[in-house]
Image: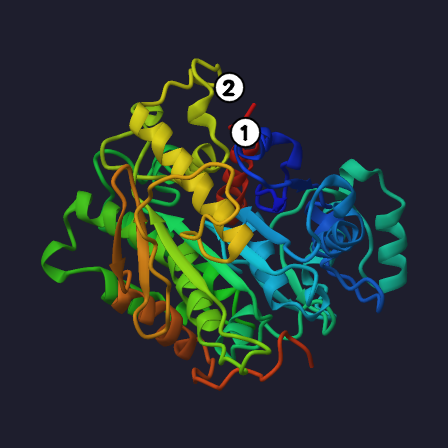
């Protein structure tokens, strides 16, 4: 199992995650990967051999190393699962879409992140020129600009405003939305999901207009365009103005539109749906909709979840906050099993139910990595009696509500998912249709945004 850390592609490290807990309990080898971050990892250029996506290319090299060497560490190069959270989840989904990654892994897990990143066409130097101007490099001539940037100290150029992926025709052939819409992706088993209140605590604690007293209608209308910009940036040439009123119509009941608590809750809900849940559902439908090709390429097995349990260590949060971004990391890496450990900001003190949930999630994850099915414990070092996790299909759209008492459900916020995955793209000029997938085994052929992305850095310290 190869782990790609989160951190908004701005920071973080693979060293911050205690892989020794799941590996000590299960027959699995884990590899944690570092990759280039910020402008060093994602700055677009005009160079043919290096147009951008450097951090993602680092991940390709890491997977090539795993394929060539993991047997020496007791691993199986024919059963490689990539997994990641937040920006690591973005990376996993992009690797699933990339022809350069075909054959380097066999299963994938995205936690709280699927391709929710701005997209840049190859040759678009808007971001590069903005950086150059900020460090007093002339943008009049490309070669002079790049020479100036390369001559600066690393610390002057490494920080990044908003990470972006480049449609470079090598790593990424089209925009992530187009690739999912066309089902033009690698055929792999995929487990993916979200928490039920992504950014619920962060936004309410960092943004002064979201608090326990709610938010005003004026605040809702003032700040929404800024927070929707990340959505529009996923569609080339997309404009927030095209979707602002439809989003408000979708989420605001006219009879409740002046209730500050209602406005706050709807604001948080729409951002979570747009940034996290809708891309996750779209990817699940794309991968599960890949047609089977007889025995040679059976249909991908897809499993979706939504984490419902907010751990007792987060009792200091406001009562309206549910399971926030990054909370799943504690459970997947077995932190509840570390009794009386001290973290950066609190003492880890989990209930027995939470220890059991952590054991279940680790078992689900490893079962999936081992056998392609979270319910199949064949070869497991430890057997657990767990709730059956139904397989996601395009027709049933079943998923597991992960909780201290887990249960199955189906069609997670279906009408809202259709709004974000079909209506919003249409409004932004995209052609929404359902092509049959390619019949191969893989793919061939602003400051406020920074503050949101920077929160992803927090997960790097949760394990400290």
Q: Is 435 on the left-hand or right-hand side of 131?
A: left
Mark 1, Cα crowd under 10 Å, few <14 / some 14-19 / many 20+, is some
Rendering coords of residue 180 (x, y %): 51, 73
Q: Dot 2: what SS?
A: loop
Instruction: Residue at 45% x, 48% y: name it.
Output: 377
Residue 204 sits above or below residue 437 on the image:
above
Is residue 383 or residue 121 the one in the foreground? 383
Instruction: Residue at 50% x, 34% y: name it.
Output: 333
Residue 5 sits above or below residue 233 on the image:
above
Rendering coords of residue 32 (x, y %): 66, 40
Given the current orientation, which residue lies at the most extreme front position? 379
- Tag shown at residue 344: 2
Residue 176 location, quadrant? bottom right
- Tag shown at residue 42: none
- Tag shown at residue 21: 1
Residue 423 location, quadrant? bottom left
Marks counted in the figure total 2
Mark 2, Cα crowd under 10 Å, few <14 / some 14-19 / many 20+, is few
Instruction: Residue at 34% x, 50% y: name it.
Output: 306
Instruction: Residue at 44% x, 71% y: name it.
Output: 288
Question: Which quadrant is the C terminus positioned in?
Answer: top right
Is residue 433 or residue 119 the one in the foreground? 433
Q: Dot 1: what SS?
A: helix
Mark toward the start of the polypeptide (2 vs 1): 1
Look at the image and tell me whether residue 325 can be seen: no
Rendering coords of residue 96 (x, y %): 60, 64
Rendering coords of residue 397 (x, y %): 32, 67
Residue 168 sits above or below residue 313 on the image:
below
- Mark in front: 2 vs 1: 1
Residue 123 location, quadrant? bottom right
Look at the image and tell me whether residue 310 can be seen: yes
Q: Is 23 on the left-hand or right-hand side of 390?
A: right
């Amino acid at each position: 199992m190869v782990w790609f850390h989160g951190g908004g592609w701005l920071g973080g490290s693979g060293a911050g995650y205690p892989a020794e807990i799941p590996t000590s309990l299960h027959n699995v080898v884990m590899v944690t990967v570092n990759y280039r971050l910020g402008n060093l990892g994602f700055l677009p250029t005009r160079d043919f051999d290096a147009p951008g996506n450097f951090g993602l290319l680092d991940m390709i090299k890491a997977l090539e190393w795993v394929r060539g060497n993991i047997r020496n560490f007791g691993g199986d190069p024919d059963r490689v699962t990539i997994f990641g959270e937040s920006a690591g989840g973005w990376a996993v989904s992009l690797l699933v879409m990339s022809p350069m990654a075909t054959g380097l892994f066999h299963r994938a897990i995205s936690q709280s992140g699927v391709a929710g990143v701005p997209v840049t066409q190859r040759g678009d130097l808007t971001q590069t020129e903005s950086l150059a101007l900020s460090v007093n490099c002339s943008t009049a001539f490309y070669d002079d600009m790049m020479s100036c940037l390369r001559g600066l100290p690393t610390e002057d150029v490494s920080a990044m405003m908003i990470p972006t992926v480049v449609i470079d025709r090598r790593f990424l052939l089209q925009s992530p939305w187009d690739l999912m819409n066309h089902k033009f992706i690698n055929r792999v088993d995929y487990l993916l999901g979200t928490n039920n209140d992504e950014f619920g605590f962060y936004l309410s604690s960092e943004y002064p207009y979201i608090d326990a007293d709610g938010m005003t209608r004026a605040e809702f209308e003032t700040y929404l365009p800024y927070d929707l910009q990340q959505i529009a940036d996923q569609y080339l040439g997309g404009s927030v103005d095209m979707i602002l009123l439809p989003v408000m119509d979708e989420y605001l009941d006219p009879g409740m539109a002046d209730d500050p608590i209602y406005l706050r809750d709807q604001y948080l809900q729409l951002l979570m749906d747009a940034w996290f849940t809708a891309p996750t559902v779209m990817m699940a439908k794309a991968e599960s909709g890949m047609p089977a090709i007889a025995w040679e390429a059976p249909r991908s097995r897809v499993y979706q979840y939504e984490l419902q349990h907010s751990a007792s260590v987060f009792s200091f949060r406001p009562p309206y906050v549910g399971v926030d971004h990054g909370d799943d990391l504690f459970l997947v890496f077995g932190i509840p099993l570390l009794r009386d450990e001290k973290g950066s900001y609190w003492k880890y003190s989990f209930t027995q139910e939470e220890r059991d949930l952590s054991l279940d999630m680790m078992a689900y994850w490893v079962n999936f990595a081992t056998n392609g099915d979270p319910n199949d414990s064949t070869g497991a070092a430890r057997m657990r009696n767990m709730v059956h996790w139904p397989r996601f299909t395009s027709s049933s759209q079943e998923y597991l509500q992960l909780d201290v008492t887990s249960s199955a459900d189906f069609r997670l916020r279906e009408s809202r998912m259709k709004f974000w995955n079909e209506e919003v793209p249409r409004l932004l000029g995209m052609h929404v249709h359902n092509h049959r997938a390619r019949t191969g085994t893989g793919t061939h052929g602003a400051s406020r945004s920074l503050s949101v992305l920077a929160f992803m850095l927090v997960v790097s310290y949760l394990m400290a």
